[in-house]
Image (cartoon, helix red, strand yellow):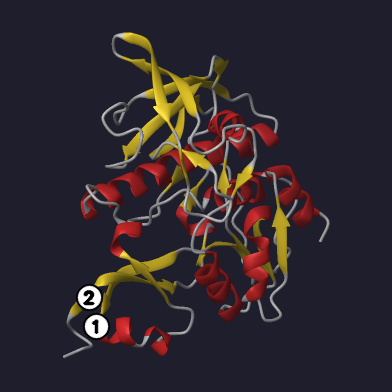
Amino acid sequence: MLWFVPSNEYIFLPDPPRAVEPLVQVPGEKRTDENGGIYMVDIFVRKASLLERLIPGIHDGASLVPAKDVNPIGVSESQRIKQSQDEMSQSQKIAAAVALRQLGYKVNVKTNGVEVTAVYPGAPAAGKLEVGDVIVSVNGKPVETTADLQRLMRDVEPGDTVKFGVRRSGGVEQVDLDTVASTDQDRRAIVGVQIDQSATIDLPVAIKIDTGSIGGPSAGLAFSLDIVDELGKKDLDDDKKIVVTGALDLDGTVEPIGGIKQKTIAARDAHADLFLVPDDNAAEARRYADGLDVVPVSTFREALSVLTNQ
């Protein structure tokens, strides 16, 4: 009975890497029979059973996570899944834009701020910011990209008050927000929102990516590398199994992702030849690598350089 009765916690488990090429349709792509390829890697998330809650070590690489950390109070399971799928959709557009620019295509991109995709109840932003608001400035300094917002917030200490310029249907409003310390090791100042890049992206090539029900932004780097692999002159994987994780910004910056423990174990167990990870995730990834070659990268071009020079 303990195996079948769900607990009030979630369990994160490794999920086998997936080849990216079958998921990405690119006009003019070159299809080749090869042993290697570029792979994305996700994690499997579900409610833990009572037995798994009592003995989480029953699964290799499992992590128990409180429900409030998966679905914050006031955010339903369906809302979380919708947010995750929206992040995946945006990451695909950004990946295509970054890759096509690298290949010399003219990509029309207009960044216009950072969209609020969720506001956590009880956070400083609750009641002051709404889903759909677009942050365009912090303390009078312009914000066009998520990287801009993150850079400006690094100068803010927990407890400080920040003035956000917020674009709404009625125009731009100035909103004063208190900050609190995040629960991670960085003790960053946060206001309690989830964000995504607000941008208009006009692709010159009709690229389609179908990942089914998989959500989140962490496959962005893998998608971008695969598009260059399919349209470019050089075979990036060189018959090696390259597992890749990392969220991608429009300027090519590789952002850290969650679930690195499970993703590393999945890449290791899949006998990957190389595992590309964001710089900020590399130290933790190496704790679980057990011989897997973990290569940290901070930008798309750095990741591309690693593969072209291997």
Quadrant placement of the C terminus: bottom right
- Please identify the quarter of the rendering in which residue 281 is found: bottom right
Q: Residue at x 53, y 33 (%)?
A: 146
Dot 2, crowdedness within 10 Å: few (<14), some or many (≥20)? some
- As drawn, is 83 to the left or to the right of 204? left
Question: Which percent across, then down, holds residue 94?
Answer: 53, 37
Residues at circles 1 and 2 in contact by the CB criterion of under 8 Å: yes
Asked whether residue 303 is in view, the answer is yes
Question: Which percent across, then down, holds residue 66?
Answer: 33, 66
Q: Residue at x 29, y 52 (%)?
A: 72
Question: For mark 2, what is the residue?
Answer: 7
Question: Which percent across, then down, holds residue 185?
Answer: 56, 56
Question: For mark 1, what is the residue?
Answer: 50
Give the residue type that dot 1 points to.
Leu
Question: Which percent across, then down, holds residue 214?
Answer: 37, 57
Residue 64 to residue 155: above or below: below
| Observer-nearest of 269 and 196 | 196
